[in-house]
Image (cartoon, rainbow, N blue to C red):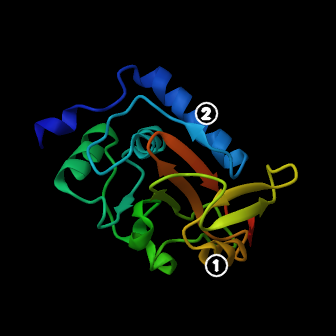
Amino acid sequence: MRADALTGGFADAPREAAIGFRAVMQAMARPGTIHRLGGAKPPLPLSVAAGVVLLTLCDPETPIFLGDSVKNQDVTSWISFHAGSPIVSPAAAMFALGRWDDFRQLHAFPIGSAEYPDRSATVIIEMDELGATGEGSCRLTGPGIKDHSSLCLPDPATFQSNSALFPLGLDFILTAGDCVAALPRSTKIEVL
């Protein structure tokens, strides 16, 4: 294991994990809202937010798929040391991490079953930035959204197709820098 893998985790793990967990759950409960995360310093090319999400939600029982854009020795060693999560193929993943181009084959990830819709993957997408306006701006409605919210998505049609699978489908967490937003499968998406 590389010595760099030993650094960059939470300095005060119980406190920082609780703060990170609350922010991620707020993002998931209120789709389209953007929240700030801090406390982790993962290796490049991971963002602070992606590192916090991994340290907060993943453990040795959480298989992770890493896309080509983020998979390197530093990242795999860091995840192994701090979360203990095994790196797996898409079909075995509970979490997936990468940039949007890494996920052209979303159908390869588990979407749950009629008996166990919760046995689906959560896809963490590293973005350049998170925002409500600009290219890919979408109107979001559904559970956790009072009227509507807005969020820019890399490929709105794919997210719409995923939403149509509800109660099956993938959940998405979007990260950029120290920011996080979420898009549960129950969210309806309309391109603006």
Residue type at mark 2 is Arg
Q: Nearer the viewer, residue 52 or 48?
A: 48
Left or right placement of residue 19 versus residue 118 in this view: left
Instruction: Judge whether 51 appears above or below 16 on screen.
Output: below
In this figure, which residue is indicated by the disc labeled 1?
157
Image position, residue 31 (x, y; %): 70, 52
Toward which corner of the image does residue 162 lie, by quadrant? bottom right
Image position, residue 97 (x, y; %): 41, 59
Left or right placement of residue 144 versus residue 91 in this view: right
Give the mark, 2 or 1, whose residue is nearer the N terminus. Answer: 2
Numbered disc in front, either 2 or 1 = 1
User: What whole-number distance in Å separates the C-alpha atoms at marks 2 and 1?
Assistant: 29 Å
Instruction: Judge whether 185 appears above or below 55 on screen.
Output: below
Instruction: Judge whether 166 appears above or below 53 on screen.
Output: below
- Where disc 2 sits, the SS reads helix
Which numbered disc covers residue 22?
2
Q: Residues within 10 Å of mark 2 (few under 14, many from 20)?
A: some
Residue at 43% x, 46% y is 50
Image position, residue 102 (x, y; %): 39, 71
Left or right placement of residue 9 versus residue 116 in this view: left
Residue at 62% x, 61% y is 134
The residue at the far left in this view is 2
- Residue 186 shows up from this direction: no
Left or right placement of residue 149 versus residue 12 in this view: right
Instruction: Judge whether 95 appears above or below 136 on screen.
Output: above
- Residue 153 shows up from this direction: yes
